[in-house]
Image (spheres, rainbow, N blue to C red):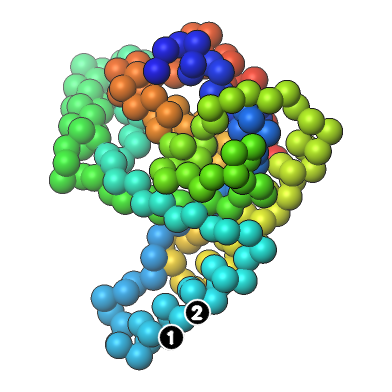
Amino acid sequence: MSVTELHRAIPQRIVRGAILRSDGCTVGLVTGGAPAWDLRSRESKARLAEAYHRTLLAQDAPVDIYIIDGPPDLEREMTELYRRSNQAGHPTLTAVLDDMAAYLEECAGATASRHRQTIWAIACNDGPAGARPRTIGALLSANNVAGSTPRASALLTEAVERARRLADALMALGGSPQPRLLEAEEIARLWFRLVDPVRAARYPLQGALLERIRSVVRDR
């Protein structure tokens, strides 16, 4: 993906729990985990599966479910350890902090430390083409750009409310970690990693692209 294509795919707005794509489609986003499945009896599993099925059918819009398998995101912890290391006034403390940061960096790249993140996505509309996306990367990006419409803000609010209702319903099933709305910063990082994985693996969000992303991220 070229830089121009990447900039064209940048969402119009990102808030806690939802994204307004560049083509005007809004998507609510929830993340979380599954209940302790292995410890349940066959009857309990059947009841839980039925309750989960009813929860999805009860939503007033189709729900797409994605499982992302990747290394744990430890960038924030590593940055903090290196910051403290640079400010440490004792060589021993500096060495310990550097070793801890190096260990986390090794864990972040090790296949044994990979984890699965489940994301439920609920769209307020199917976008201009009306086609169901096959991947979450396709769901979060758009092939064409549309200007902001008067209904955009209302659709974004609706997407957040739908995501909140879905998270509350999933929470009642006892998932761990508990289902919750994706934070705006999490959505931005996820969007970048899925839309352009090659560039995201080599270069962190920085420079003009980072400032552009910051301009569309809003706290809610």
> Quadrant where the N terminus lies?
top left
Q: Residue furthest right?
A: 150
Residue 62 locus on image (x, y percent): 57, 59
Q: Circle 2 is placed at which residue position?
A: 51
| Residue 134 picture location, percent across and down | 42, 46
21 to 70, vertically: above or below: above
> What's the residue type where badge 1 is placed?
Arg
Q: Are marks 1 and 2 in contact (CB under 8 Å)?
A: yes
Q: In which quarter of the view is residue 34 placed?
A: bottom left
Q: Circle 1 is placed at which residue position?
A: 47
Residue for point 53% across, 51% down: 121
Please name the residue shown 60% across and 62% down the image: 166
Give the residue displayed 76% in from the left and 36% down from the top: 152
Q: Which residue is rendered at x = 16% and y = 41% of the image?
A: 111
The answer to whether residue 17 is seen in the rendering is no
Q: Position of residue 101 (x, y in %)?
A: 25, 28
Q: Taking 37 as reference, is 88 above or below it?
A: above
